[in-house]
């Protein structure tokens, strides 16, 4: 495992933790998790070649037309 792969793995774990605990203290830094922290970490993760998971869209065309 290269250093880059290791760092991406750590960042992936941090992002998962941050997304699940926004507004709460981070187990990594002890600071309150903010959207800005998540954004900064996401940018760095992507710069290193990381891939984000995508979730299926839960909104159908019917709901969009009603809004």
Image: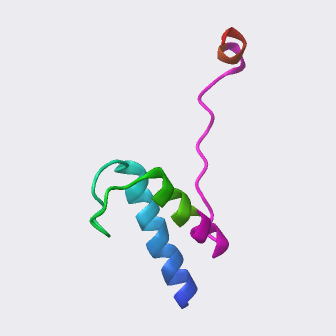
- Tag count: 0
Quadrant in which residue 47 is drawn: bottom right
Where residue 1 sits in the image (x, y, percent)? 52, 89
Residue at 37% x, 49% y is 22
Q: Is residue 49 left or right of residue 23?
A: right
Between 4 and 36, the residue placed more toward the observer is: 36
Where residue 11 sits in the image (x, y, percent)? 48, 70
**Considering only vertical position in the picture, is 26 above or below 49?**
above
Q: Is residue 1 visible?
A: no
Quadrant in which residue 57 is drawn: top right
Residue at 31% x, 69% y is 29
36 within the magenta span: no
**Considering only vertical position in the picture, is 10 above or below 26?**
below
Q: Which residues are magenta?
A: 43-62
Q: Is residue 32 left or right of residue 38?
A: left
Where residue 14 sits in the image (x, y, percent)? 42, 65
- Predominant secondary structure, magenta span: loop
Residue at 61% x, 38% y is 56
55 within the magenta span: yes
Where residue 18 sits in the image (x, y, percent)? 40, 56
Q: Is residue 35 visible?
A: yes
Residue at 48% x, 66% y is 12
Residue found at the very far top of the displayed protein:
66
| Quadrant assignment for the C terminus | top right
């Amino acid at each position: 495992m290269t250093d880059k792969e290791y760092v991406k793995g750590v960042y992936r774990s941090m992002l998962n933790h941050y997304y699940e605990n926004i507004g709460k203290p981070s187990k990594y830094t002890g600071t309150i998790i903010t959207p800005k922290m998540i954004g900064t970490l996401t940018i760095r993760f992507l710069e290193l070649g990381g891939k984000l998971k995508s979730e299926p869209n839960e909104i159908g065309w019917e709901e969009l037309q009603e809004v």
